[in-house]
Amino acid sequence: MAERPRVLAISSTGGHWIQLLRLAPAFDGVTLHYATTSADFRGHIERIAQNRGQPRPAYHVLTDANRWEKMKLIRQAVEVLLLLLRVRPDVIITTGASVGYFAVRFGRMLGARTCWLDSIANARELSLSGARAGPHADFWLTQWPELARPGGPSYEGQVL
């Protein structure tokens, strides 16, 4: 029997996390790892998996940081890199923000396939992290046709 692909679904909390969880049906049949910046959602993802008849996914908590907290960003980057080295995902999917940026950048270097799905909330312009990470992702999506452009991101319809 072939080994199931290892997928890392990673995002910060808030709207990014809610949107990532809405992709749960796409993760059926894989070895799933979730990573986010809060320990509060472990039970929730376990219930989602149980309701879908899927194995309990691994859950990883990373330092929360933003562009104004440079030292925390450095710590977060190191944590994401160590997580990738430990999990060795075949695929990384993210809805943002900084943890997703680091996962895309480091994941590509480690040979993972990467997907950046920009937030549906970004209707007028791409998110800062999406604009920076997207060009490095294997698959870069926007959920607004007005934001699609040659070279990415692509619009393939509203995902969420």
Image (cartoon, helix red, strand yellow):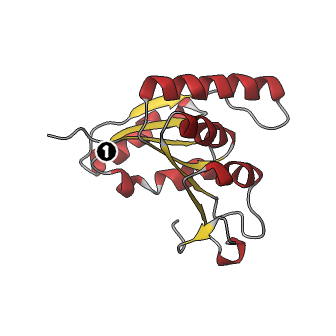
Name above or below for residue 18 compared with residue 12: below
- Give the residue at x 77% y 65%: 125
Q: Quadrant of the N terminus?
A: top left
Image spot of residue 144 (x, y percent): 65, 73
Image spot of residue 31 (x, y percent): 32, 39
- Give the residue at x 27% y 41%: 4
Name above or below for residue 30 compared with residue 157: above
Horizontal side of 140 relative to 58 (left or right) equals: right
Name above or below for residue 150 compared with residue 75: below
Please state which amino acid type lies under the numbered disc 1: Val
Q: Dot 1 lies on which element?
A: loop
Q: Nearer the viewer, residue 50 or 10?
A: 10
Quadrant in the rendering for residue 106: top right
| Residue under label 1 | 30
Image spot of residue 94 (x, y percent): 56, 48
- Give the residue at x 52% y 33%: 110
Quadrant in the rendering for residue 44: top left
Q: How many marks?
A: 1
Binning the other alpha carbons within 10 Å of mark 1 as few (below 14), some (14 to 19) or many (20 upward) gives: some
Horizontal side of 85 relative to 99 (left or right) equals: left
Image spot of residue 160 (x, y percent): 52, 65
Quadrant in the rendering for residue 69: top right
Q: Nearer the viewer, residue 75 or 20?
A: 75
Q: Name the outermost residue toward the bottom.
A: 146
Name above or below for residue 37 compared with residue 139: above
Q: Nearer the viewer, residue 131 or 44?
A: 131
Q: Name the outermost residue toward the right.
A: 68
